Image (cartoon, grey):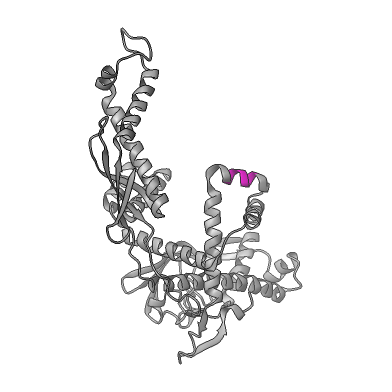
Amino acid sequence: MQITVEDAGGCKRIIKAEVPADVVTSKLNDGYRDINKQVQFPGFRKGKAPRNVLEKRFGKEVSDDVRQTLADEAVKEAVDEHALKLLGTVEVVEVSDIKANNPVQLTLEAEVYPEFELPEYKGLELERPVAKVEEQEIHAQLRGAQMNKGDLKSQEGASKKGQFIRASLKVTVDDEEIFSQDRGLLEVGFGWVAGLKPAKAEEQLVGLKKDEHKEIKLKLPKDFEREDLRGKDAVIDLTVDDVLEYEGPSIDDLAKENGFEDEAAWREEIRGELLKKKEADLDRATEEKALGKVADNTEMQLPEKFSERKAAELVQQQAYRMYQQGMPEESIREFLDKNRGQGVDEVKSMLKRAFVTDAIARKERLVVTEEEIQREVQRLAQMVGRTADEVYAQFQQNGTISGMREELKTSKVLKLLRQKAKYVDPGAGTGKKAEKKAEDKAE
């Protein structure tokens, strides 16, 4: 078989194959021979039907099978001879007639992994805020522990400091709703509402009665989680569902019950746990920013058809989740109609990051060892309360091991990007770079 591969631009490749007549004839003979062994025609012993009878009855099926076999072999030879890294399925564009003693020409269209040059990915300048724990976060955890041990009882009249209200609330900026909650529990006089601290915060919820409505205006803080909303005017809109009084053990009593000397010691324990989680969250956010920066700086042509197929698969997966959740078929059909052909840009962005990650892993020779796989299996087994052997066998059965390997490799790449980055102090205001690299910081 003679194979040529043409670069059709971007990730597209045209594979052309010329199959000699003797190969075509041999494939056809094999096909008819197999059928003759399996079927029996009236008037003929099994396996003794004449060729012309077989051709009349099964000609199309045999030709289609030979066509697919030749296409598969052409793809394999093209991959072997030209080191193609295929993406998705190969499409048969054109095939000449499949006839005995005639050569066959095949034209196939494939998409391959994009070829690109990695930009500099070490020493990236990244902002990484300092992790800090607010007192209200600690207080919320303590109050949550109280709620698990005590009771909240409805009260008549207006709310007082130290009491609670249940309220349906939403937070809006201009016309955008950025947060909403039904029957959220708010402490009167504490000073925080929906994680925000308005002016005169301790007084905002005092004096409210059941079914009363209130609007609280404030400016979002400069460190608000969404950068595009920082410092903007916001409105907390709430309607009181109930006024409540807490009855139960004090925080100090619960501290001693949980093995702490007093409330202060318990607070410090909670502070440490929250800080550890925030540091981990900041690490992940820093890694994602680093990878996004590398991807943005990478010139790459992405596979069009593969991206479209992947986008369609994601839409179908979401529709299946809707079906599992018991949503009406009409809603699912509307979702499919609305989103058919959507999401290609998002898929391309995901693919670009994946290609960049893979390229960095190859360049840095980052591999995942069997020992690392076993450690991860052991960790997951402890989480779900099963043996490591059971979890490993399940992962092997459903093909999850390869996904685990890719995830661990990706984690290594992200960690490398974070460790090799240079921090820029987001609060300095001067743009001065922090000379200390991320790798110098304590893990």
Does residue 47 sit above or below 384 in this rendering? above
Where, quadrant-wise, is the N terminus in this rendering? top left
Q: Would you identify the image quadrant in which residue 74 lies?
A: top left
Tally of numbered discs: 0
Q: Is residue 240 above or below residue 338?
A: below
Q: Which residues are magenta?
A: 390-395
In this view, the residue farthest toward the top is: 43
Image quadrant for the C terminus? bottom right
Q: Main secondary structure of the magenta part?
A: helix
Q: Residue furthest bottom?
A: 430
Question: In terms of depth relative to the viewer, which is nearer, 10 or 405?
Answer: 10
* Towards the viewer: 46 or 263: 46
Residue located at (36% from left, 17% from top): 39
Residue 34 falls in which quadrant of the image? top left
The residue sitting at 34% across, 38% down in the picture is 70
Depth order, front residue of 130/167: 130
| Residue 261 seen in the figure | yes
In the image, taking residue 282 as reference, residue 336 lies left or right, namely left
The residue sitting at 30% across, 28% down in the picture is 61
Residue 7, position as x, y percentages in the image: 29, 58
Quick check: 360 above or below 15? below
Residue 4 as seen in the image, left or right of residue 153: left
Q: Is residue 200 magenta?
A: no
Percent across and percent down for residue 395 are: 57, 46
Name the spot of residue 245 as percent of width and height, x first: 57, 66
Which residue is nearer to you in this view: 313 or 155?
313
